[in-house]
Amino acid sequence: MRSSQHSSARPRDDVDFQLAESPALSRSTVDRRELVRGDPGLVRALWENGRVLAVDPLGRALVTRQDGAPHRRRLVDRPATGAEPPEGAVLLGADGDTGYWAVPVSEGDAETWAERVPESEREWLDLRFTGALLDDTGAGLLTTAVGLLSWHRRAAFCANCGAPSVVSHAGWTRHCTGCGREEYPRTDPAVICLVHDGAGNVVLARQPTWPPDRYSILAGFVETGESLEHCVVREVAEEVGVQVSEVRYLGSQPWPFPRSLMVGFTALAEPSAPLRPADGEIEQAHWVPRDRVRAALRAGGGVPGLILPGASSIARGMLEAWASAG
């Protein structure tokens, strides 16, 4: 915590801001039905009354424009067919008696899947682009589908003995054919922190691999034996050489690329402290005034020299909340 002298010396116009709404990929409306997954009869019933969405090898789903809202999208699903879920199908959840499922499709099968939708009205879009354009149900379904199917692609062999593993529990478990070990979808926690000075300036940085002028707030993975708050302090110090205080939780968002959970925080730092970007990890870092962030947001997410994170990212919602404070 800061000393009383430090606290009284700094205006507190934007210290207590909150997220205005749930992050784009944190929205969900369906019941996950965890207790149903191990009951073949109940799983079969949810398939018989199911709706199915397809995800291609690039993690894209078929979407179409939402009626009356040209800038919105809706997922294209189809009624389930056959008596049993096909190999690779995963149960995303249910609404009443209707089950929602996802299936992986190859590039060739993707074209067949889309045949029922006029070519001029369909798009295959990934979650980063379309997450913020979907309604709450669609965003939750696609986020879960992308994360689950990505896990299955990477978990075909047992981490304990190396033997092949098979899918069970409606896609939520893999069972080793060798040692019998059960494995569940992994989630890797990561912190993402909006560092500001309490007086209208925020730290924005860019990685060397990002497109030109793309900037975001700071993020990093939680290490073994580390709390979320300590991770915030460590990551900020490592990435830009600044010490922070008053670490405060804002919200969280799944980020299935491939399996992260982004836990959002805000923290205070002294703007007089020089930023020292970590060599090889951070290409540039700057204190950016609120007016410039606001200008980028009014322009749809970017102005010359400053492109903000996409609307599907919790980083965008955090910046919007901070920019509207004060």
Image (cartoon, grey):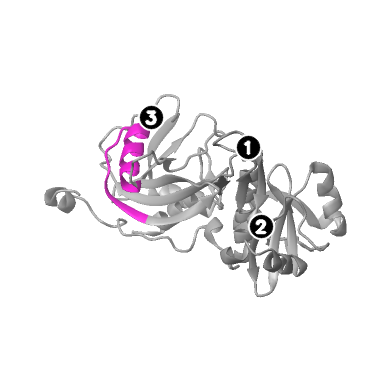
Q: Quick check: 36 left or right of 220? A: right
Q: Quick check: 282 left or right of 179? A: left
Task: Give the structural element (helix, strand or loop) at label 1.
Answer: loop
Front-most of 264 and 16? 264
Residue under numbered circle 2: 170
Q: Name the residue at 32% across, 56% down.
A: 14
Front-most of 239 and 11? 239
- Quarter of the image for residue 120 reads bottom right
Please report contact status of discs 1 and 3: CB closer than 8 Å, yes or no.
Answer: no
Residue furthest front as drawn: 179
Residue 62 makes an appearance in the image: no
In the image, what residue type sits under mark 3?
A: Pro
Is residue 162 part of the magenta span, yes or no? no
Task: Give the structural element (helix, strand or loop) at label 2.
Answer: helix
Residue under numbered circle 1: 157
Q: Earlier in the sequence, mark 1 or mark 3?
A: 1
In the image, what residue type sits under mark 2?
A: Ala
Distance of label 1 from label 3 (alpha carbons): 39 Å
Distance of label 2 from label 1 (alpha carbons): 18 Å
- Quarter of the image for residue 34 reads bottom right
Q: How many numbered marks does the figure carry?
A: 3
Q: Name the residue at 55% across, 62% down.
A: 27
Q: Earlier in the sequence, mark 2 or mark 1?
A: 1
Q: Earlier in the sequence, mark 2 or mark 3?
A: 2
Q: Name the residue at 62% across, 47% down.
A: 175
Crowd band around label 1 with a 10 angstrom C-alpha radius: few (<14), some (14–19), many (20+)? some
Residue under numbered circle 3: 277
Task: Tell me the magenta residue range.
Answer: 228-249
State the image coordinates of residue 161 (x, y, percent, origin top left).
Answer: 57, 34
State the image coordinates of residue 261 (x, y, percent, origin top left).
Answer: 48, 49
- Answer above or below: position of 117 versus 236: below
